[in-house]
């Protein structure tokens, strides 16, 4: 028998090292996770887009003069006129202030009731004011909301209200100045009347002085009256409110692209986390690298073989490798085992026996599972005597199930199965099989469950272990190998059962 050496295990690829081909293999195996999580992320994104109302944005441009009226600036020599110059930053803070928004909402509601605080907060949260370029005095006012027409209407109303409040402040200042100038004009007119009644030498000079003063005051009054008329309609709107055609939120294309990207990345992360956490083998290369066993062949599962009959090539490769192994072996007996229960064990050994029989080899298929062997069900031989009865009766015969293929099944379960397999009667039965058949294939219970495999394996020159993708772990294989080595049994190779795509 080929000796299993620790050197093979040492040569196994380090678990911490991973190549690009392994990364590609991991992603390929986990493609369903990546695709599923990506689709789930996309569905969630679409649900979000359908559930969330689109938000549109209306914007307008207004001009803020550094002095509220150039006409007033011309009257700086008049002590009655206030300087009402305003900066862009002050205008921005004023329009964004809760007091201004609150008063605007109250005015919009016809000043009937005090608006609820959340209404003013809502408008304040939707309103943005910023200067277009440093020192330009041009403000861009934007208002967002789900109704484009309502946004435009509300923004127009807000701009009108701002200019109305600003102009009202200017008009109030002008009216105060006008009141003072009119009082001064009245006083000057009284002084002129009194000077005309007096008969003094300086009368003419005094009258001229008073009349000049009266004309100056009247001129200032006329200028302020014109300024008041202009201030009432002062509204510097450079661009009327317009709404965006496309919603500013949510960004449909961006949300979908991000959902696909995030879903794909999350799927990849999940695949690699599962790969790190999983303990089972998924490929034959991985099985060889992590266990040191030589994989004789990759074979199809029973389900795949039913749906795709053409995938028998793996069993033909297994047949060839097994026959080559038996040529130099001490006997023609081959044990097929598994570390732990796998659903494909009977399928693998039966299909292998069939391939050998088709190749012209006379094959004895022996089910040595005296605990719960069910191979007889595949051939409908439940009424025939099983292995236990044949050993008791020294019956060296088998049931012919097909050309070149005979069967001894384990359809009876004695109380002492291990002792039965260790008996000389079982040895004699195997010797009879070796002399009458080209190949004797023996199926045994899982190695880690009972010791039967170690007993049978010591009587066979070739011992094969089934590794089922997605089910058999490295830990189980190592534990089974240790148990077999304690009985002097060494696994010569592995049969890897692929997962169905």
Image: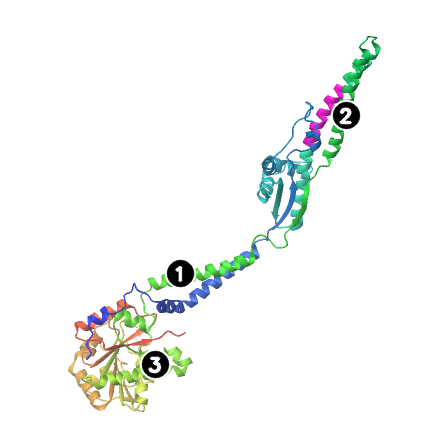
Q: Position of residue 457 (x, y in %)?
A: 20, 78
| Sequence-earlier tag: 2 or 1 | 2
355 or 222: nearer the eye? 222
Q: Which residue is mark 2?
A: 219
- Mark 2 or mark 1, which is nearer to you? 2
Q: Is residue 37 left or right of residue 111?
A: left
Q: Are discs 2 and 1 less than 8 Å apart at CB?
A: no
Is residue 10 shown left or right of residue 128? left
Res 269 label: 1
Cα distance between the residues tagged 2 and 1: 83 Å
- Look at the image and give the residue range highlighted in magenta: 168-184
Q: Residues within 10 Å of mark 1 (few under 14, many from 20)?
A: some
Q: Is residue 395 visible?
A: no
Residue position marked by numbered label 3 in the rendering: 314
Contact between labelled residues 2 and 3, with CB atoms less than 8 Å apart: no
Q: Is residue 42 above or below residue 322?
A: above
């Amino acid at each position: 028998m080929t000796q299993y050496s620790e050197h093979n295990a040492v040569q196994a690829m380090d678990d911490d090292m991973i190549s690009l081909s392994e990364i590609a293999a991991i992603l390929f195996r986990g493609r369903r996770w990546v695709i599923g999580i990506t689709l789930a992320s996309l569905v969630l994104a679409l649900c979000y887009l359908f559930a969330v109302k689109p938000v549109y944005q209306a914007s307008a441009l207004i001009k803020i003069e550094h002095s509220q009226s150039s006409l007033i600036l011309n009257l700086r020599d008049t002590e009655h006129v206030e300087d009402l110059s305003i900066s862009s930053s002050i205008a921005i803070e004023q329009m964004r202030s809760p007091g201004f928004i609150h008063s605007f909402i109250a005015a919009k509601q016809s000043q009937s009731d005090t608006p609820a605080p959340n209404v003013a907060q809502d408008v304040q949260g939707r309103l943005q004011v910023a200067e277009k370029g440093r020192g330009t005095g041009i403000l861009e006012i934007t208002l967002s909301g789900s109704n484009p027409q309502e946004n435009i209407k509300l923004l127009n109303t807000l701009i009108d209200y701002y200019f109305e409040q600003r102009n009202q402040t200017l008009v109030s200042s002008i009216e105060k100045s006008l009141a003072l100038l009119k009082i001064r004009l009245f006083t000057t007119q009284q002084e002129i009347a009194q000077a005309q009644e007096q008969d003094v030498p300086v009368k003419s000079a005094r009258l001229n002085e008073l009349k000049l003063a009266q004309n100056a005051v009247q001129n200032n009054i006329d200028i302020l009256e014109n300024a008041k008329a202009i201030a009432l309609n002062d509204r510097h709107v450079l661009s009327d409110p317009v709404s965006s055609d496309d919603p500013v939120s949510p960004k449909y294309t961006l949300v979908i692209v991000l959902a696909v990207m995030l879903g794909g990345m999350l799927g990849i992360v999940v695949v690699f986390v599962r790969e790190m956490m999983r303990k089972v083998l998924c490929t034959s290369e991985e099985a060889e690298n992590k266990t040191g066993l030589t994989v004789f062949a990759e074979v199809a599962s029973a389900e795949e073989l039913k749906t795709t009959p053409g995938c028998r090539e793996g069993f033909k490769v297994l047949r060839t490798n097994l026959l080559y192994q038996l040529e130099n072996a001490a006997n023609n007996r081959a044990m097929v085992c598994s570390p732990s229960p796998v659903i494909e064990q009977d399928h693998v050994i039966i299909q292998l026996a069939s391939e050998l029989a088709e190749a012209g080899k006379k094959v004895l298929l022996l089910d040595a599972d005296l605990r719960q062997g069910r191979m007889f069900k595949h051939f409908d031989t439940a009424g025939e005597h099983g292995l236990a009865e044949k050993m008791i009766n020294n019956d060296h015969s088998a049931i012919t199930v097909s050309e070149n293929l005979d069967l001894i099944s384990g359809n009876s379960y004695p109380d002492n199965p291990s002792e039965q397999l260790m008996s000389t009667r079982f040895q004699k039965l195997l010797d009879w099989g070796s002399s009458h058949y080209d190949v004797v294939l023996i199926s045994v219970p899982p190695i880690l469950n009972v010791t039967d495999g170690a007993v049978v394996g010591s009587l066979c020159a070739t011992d094969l272990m089934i590794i089922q993708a997605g089910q058999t772990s490295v830990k189980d294989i190592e534990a089974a190998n240790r148990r077999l080595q304690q009985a002097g049994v060494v696994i010569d190779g592995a049969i890897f059962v692929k997962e169905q795509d």
